[in-house]
Image (cartoon, helix red, strand yellow):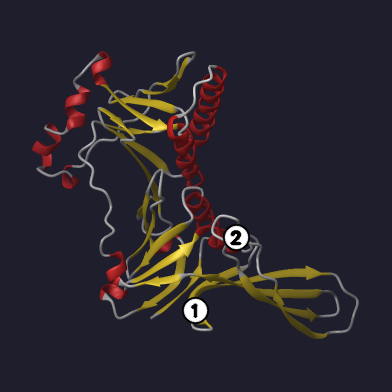
Amino acid sequence: MRFKSSIRNVSTFIKLAASLNSLGKVAWIRLDNDQIRCTVIPEQGSQVWAVLSIETIFDDYSIQSAAPNNTINLEVPLASLHRALRSAQAASSASIRLTKKDSKPLLSLTILTSTHVASSGRAGLESRSFPTAPGDPDGEDGASNEGAIDEYSYNFGGGTQRETTITQDIPIRVLSAAQVEGIHEPRCRDPDVHILLPSLLQLKSISERFTKLAMSSTQKANVGFQGGAGPRLEIAANMHGGLRVGIRTEGLRIESKWEGLSNPELDAANVEGGEEGIRQHPSTKMKAKEGEDGWAVVRVEGRDWGRVLGVGRLGGRVIACKWKRGLHDGVLGIMDKGPRNGRESDC
C-alpha cells in the first residue's frame, strides 16, 4: 500500500482541513485513482460528504493498493492535519506520503522553505538537523504531531540562501474495506427548492447574531434549552430567488430577507426521466406556487448551522437544497471549479 503526492494547492488544503475540523474530530478520507472523498460523521450535528478531484489539491499523485481502483481508506485526526498544514503556509513546496514509524501508520508531510539572508561570510555550505518537540495535544482529539527540521545554508559571499526542510508526522488509522462498507451517504428525496446562496461570510455573520440574540432572549425569560440544544433558526427559500433567515422565540421575532438570488436550472441529463422528470420535479411544481405556499422552510440548530457555514472558506458556488417542511432537512453544496480542465469538486 503506497500513497505519495506533492501538494499543488496548500491554501485550499488548509481551508478544507479547517472547515472539516470545525464539524468533527476525525475524518474518513478515501483515496483512489480518480478522486478524494472526505467524510465527517459526528455523534451530533451536521455530516460532511465531500468529493474533490485530485487536481484540486495534489500534483504528481501516486497511489497503489491491493483494493479495486487502488483505494486506500484512512481515519485522520483533523486537528493534527490542520496543525501540520498550517506550518506549510509559506512553503516553497510541500509533499505528503503514507508511511510507518515503529509499525504505526502515519501521514508524513514534508515542507520546504527557502529564505535569503544577507551575509558577509565566506562561501560554503552549513547544515544542521534536529527533531521538533511533539505538538501540544489539541484538547479535542489528544493527538500531537512529531517531526524533524533539516536546515541548509548556502553562503555565496554576497548572501546566504537558507533552505529548511520540516517534516510533520500525523498519526492515522488505515481502515479495511470491511470497516467502511457499512458507511453510506444518506439518500435524500428530490428537493422542493434549490437556490444559490449569498456570501456565506455575510450569512454566517447574520445567523450567528440571530442565534446570540435568541439565546439572550431565552435566558432572560428563564427558559432552558431542552437537552442542551441551542435556539433554532428558521431558513426559508422559494424558486423565485427569495431567501429568509430568521428566529422566533417567546420574546423575539426577527428575520433577514434576500431577493434576486439565482435558482439554478436542472440538467435533464442528471434528472431521472429527462425532460419529463424535470416537469414532474418538486422544484418545478414549487415554482408555480405563489405566496407562502411557494416557500420551503427548514429549522436548524443555530450554532451547528454557523459551523456548517464555515465552509465559506473554500469559496466557490454554494447551493442550498431545501424541503417543504422539516427539522434539520437541508443540504448545503459547494461547487468549486478545479484548477484543471474546468472540472468541479463537490463539498
- Name the residue tied to disc 1: 104
SS at badge 2: helix
Displayed quadrant of residue 142:
bottom right
Q: How many marks on residues? A: 2
Residue at the (59%, 64%) spot, across then down: 84
Label drawn at residue 241: none
Q: Position of residue 243 (x, y in %)?
A: 38, 24
Q: Is residue 274 left or right of residue 330?
A: left
Q: Residues within 10 Å of mark 1 (few under 14, many from 20)?
A: few
Q: Quadrant of the N terminus?
A: bottom left
Q: Is residue 142 left or right of residue 115?
A: left
Q: Is residue 92 left or right of residue 293?
A: right
- CA gap, disc 2 to disc 1? 20 Å
Q: Position of residue 133 (x, y in %)?
A: 70, 71
Q: Position of residue 55 (x, y in %)?
A: 41, 63
Q: Position of residue 317 (x, y in %)?
A: 40, 41
Label drawn at residue 83: 2
